[in-house]
Image (tube, rainbow, N blue to C red):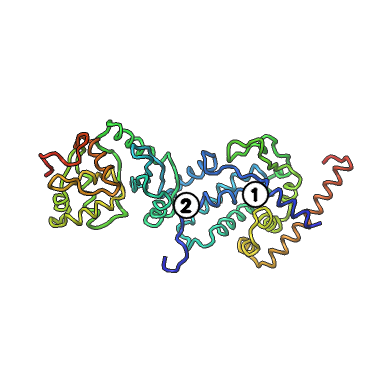
Amino acid sequence: MMGDGRAIPPFQLFYEEHGPTVYRFLVASVPRAEAEDCFQETFLAALRAYPNLRNADNLRGWVMAIASNKVIDAGRARSRRPVAVAELPENPAAGAVSAVSGGGTAQDAFDPRDPTWTAVRSLPERMRTAVVLRHVLDLPYEEVAAVMGGTEEAARANVHQGLMRLRTSLAEGAQAAEGGEAR
Amino acid sequence: MTTTSVRNLKRLGDSLRTPALDGAGSARESILAAARAEGLLDVAYASADSPFGPLLVAVTARGLVRLAYPTEAIDEVLEDLARRVSPRVLESPRDTGEVRRELDEYFDGARQAFDLDVDLSIVGGFTRRILEAAERIPFGQVITYRTIAAEAGSPRGARAAGNALGSNPIPIVVPCHRVVHSGGGLGGYTGGLERKVALLSLEGVLREGQTRIPSSGPN
C-alpha cells in the first residue's frame, strides 16, 4: 500500500460496516417514509464514486457526508411538494414495522412519532445534523466537523443551539399536553 | 436543562434499534437492482454448496472470475478481488445462480462440461496460457504437466506449469485437477490432494481407494 493509507475494502464489507450507522442517521433526520429512499440513494452514490476513492482512512465520514447531502436533497424536495408530507401524521403501522428489515418486533423501541424525534426532525438542517451525529451516533466533534464541512467550533455551536431548541420545543410540547391541549 | 436533553437524546439514540440491513431486505435488493441497471456491479459473489463445504463463487460481466474452497478466508478472497478486479464487490446470490446450478449438477454427476464463461483477466502471460490449455481437457481425462507445458508453448516448462496450475483462481471449473505426473502420480493440488482425489474419483479416473492413475497412464 506504499504509505497511501489503507486499501479500499470490498464494497460489501463497507456496506455491512457502515449501513446501520447511515440508517440510524437517516431515520433520525427525515420522515420515516423517506428514510429508505435516502438510504438507497446514499449507497448508490457511494458505489458510483467508490473506485475513485484514494484511500480508506475515513470511510465513515465520507459516507455520512453523502448521507447528509441526501437529507438536504430530501428536505428541498419536500418543501417543493404542494402538501407538506412532514406535517402529516406518520402511518402508525409503518412506524412499528421497518420497511428495511421487513419485520420489526415488539421490542423495537424506536417510535418515530415520539415527540423527541419529531422535535429532532424539525430542527434547522445544520443543527439537526450536528445533534444527530454527535448525540445519536456518538461521533467525536472532529468527525462531526469533517462530515459537515466546517470547523469543530462551528459543530459545537450547532450542537449547543440544537439542544437549546430541542429543550424549548419539548418543554412547550409537555406544557401543551399537561394543559389538555391535545396537539 | 441541556444535560437532560442530552441524556434524553442519548437514551433515545441507544433505543433506536437498527434493522438488519444485510438480510433479504428490500433496501439491499433495490440497491443491487439499481447497481445492475447502471453497470456498477463489477464483482458479484455468493456461496455455493459442494461436497467440500461452501465454496465462494464470484462473477464479473465477463464470467466466473473466482472460485474459492472453504479453507480460504472469505474476507481475504474479497479483498484480493477488490484489489485485482474492482472494489465494487457485492454479495448477490441472483447474479451467481447459473454458476451454482451447474456446480450442483456437476457434483451430482449430472453434468460433465460447464457451459460457463470464465474471466481469466486477473492472470496473465504463461499462467494464463496454461489455464486456457487446462480448460480444454475433457471430463474424465488427464494429461501430464509436460504435455500441458508444451501446449502452452514451453515444452520444458513442466515445473512452471505446476506452479501456474497451483495459482488457478477458478479450480474445478478450470480443471487443473486433470493434470498429473507422467509416472501416474497425482502431483499437487492447491485445494489439498484429497480434493484432487475426490474430483478425479467423481469423474471416474480413479476408483475407490486409488491414489495413482491406473497403468494405462496419461499421455
| Mark 1 or mark 2, whichever is nearer to me | 2
Judge whether A63 appears above or below A94 on screen. below
* Chain on which label 1 sits: A
Residue drawn where x is 48% and y is 42% of the image: B33
On the rendered image, what quadrant is the C terminus of chain A found in? top right
The residue located at (87%, 43%) in the rendering is A178
Query: B191 left or right of A54?
Result: left
Residue density around tag 2, few if under 14, some if 14–19, many if 20 or more, within 10 Å? many
Q: What residue type is labelled 2?
A: Phe
**Residue A56, x across and y down, in percent:** 49, 61
Horizontal side of B140 relative to B67 (left or right) equals left
Q: Determine which residue is flagged by label 2.
A: A11
In this figure, which residue is indicated by the disc labeled 1?
A77
Is A114 drawn above or below residue B5 in the view shown? Answer: above
Q: Where is residue B55 in the image (x, y as percent from the top left)?
A: 37, 42
| Chain of residue at mark 2 | A
Amino acid type of the residue that numbered disc 1 sits on in the rendered structure: Ala
The one nearer the camera, B176 or B37, is B176
